[in-house]
Image (cartoon, helix red, strand yellow):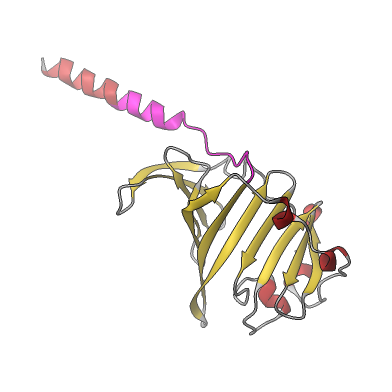
Amino acid sequence: ENMNSILALTFVALVALSTVSSLSPPVWDTPFYATFNETTKLPLIGAHTTTGRYWFVPGKTQRLDRKNGRYDRYCGSIHPLTDTSCIHWVSEGVRYLHFPDNKNECCKCCDASHGCGVLRNDWLRNATDEGVYHTDDGTAVHRWNVHGLQDNIYDGLEDRQQVPVQILQEPNDFMYFDYKSYTNTIDPADIELPDVCKKAGKCPLFSLCTIV
């Protein structure tokens, strides 16, 4: 009887493991919009938090707004030590940096050949499944980790894993999404590259854009 119990438990454990291992990482295969809070931690400078908005259209367009871009590595390299809004636009394979509250400046940062294109919709394809946890309000969240030079953790809703809950780039950048703001309905006007960017020249020589 004991042996039968052990075999039964072993079978259950194997089934559970096979179920977990058969899961595929989420794919951002539909357009979406969501809002977020972001905390950046930098040596000697400390932690700073800003709010933002994110639009994503697979393979086509990406827009990421930060109310304060000072601590973003790209925006901050153009206007260092300056509190100002900054928008990353990615259109037709080119990444632009737009400062609507700083003389409405815009410049071409880099292109897809240098890794600056639209994020691949299967960017989690090599992620490790780290299982499910529950938030304080009981929401089930599934965690995935893309191991690189740092841990890149993606948490999505368990029942809709393409909906981001948080993206943690250890140890210095933490994006916390308001998943209740997530929608697949996007106003085309919100992802139309501004005229000032369509006419933009290259970003300054001494910005991070020239290094990538």
Position of 183 with respect to 106 (left or right) is left
Query: Which portion, as a residue range, is magenta?
Result: 13-31
Magenta-span inclusion, residue 75? no
Q: Nearer the viewer, residue 182 or 129?
A: 182
**Residue 177 as seen in the image, left or right of residue 125:** left
**Image location (x, y in percent) of residue 63:** 68, 58
**For residue 125, side relative to residue 178 (left or right):** right
Q: Is residue 83 above or below residue 54?
A: below
Quarter of the figure with the C terminus = bottom right
Residue at (61%, 57%) from the top-left corner?
54
Image quadrant assignment for residue 101: bottom right
Comparing 119 with 193, the one in front is 193
25 drawn magenta? yes
Quadrant in which the N terminus is drawn: top left
User: Which picture quadrant has residue 58?
Assistant: top right
* Residue 187 visible, this angle: yes
Q: Name the spot of residue 182 as percent of width and height, x first.
A: 53, 50
The residue located at (83%, 68%) in the rendering is: 196
Q: Residue furthest left?
A: 1
Looking at the picture, tell me which residue is in the foreground, 86 or 154.
86
In percent of width and height, residue 193 lies at: 78, 59
The image shows a total of numbered marks equal to: 0
| In the image, residue 67 above or below residue 92 | below
Q: Residue at x 73, y 80 (%)?
A: 102
Q: Position of residue 131 (x, y in %)?
A: 39, 41
Q: As drawn, is 179 to the left or to the right of 55? A: left
Instruction: Please determine whether, in this image, residue 207 is positioned above or below residue 140.
Output: below
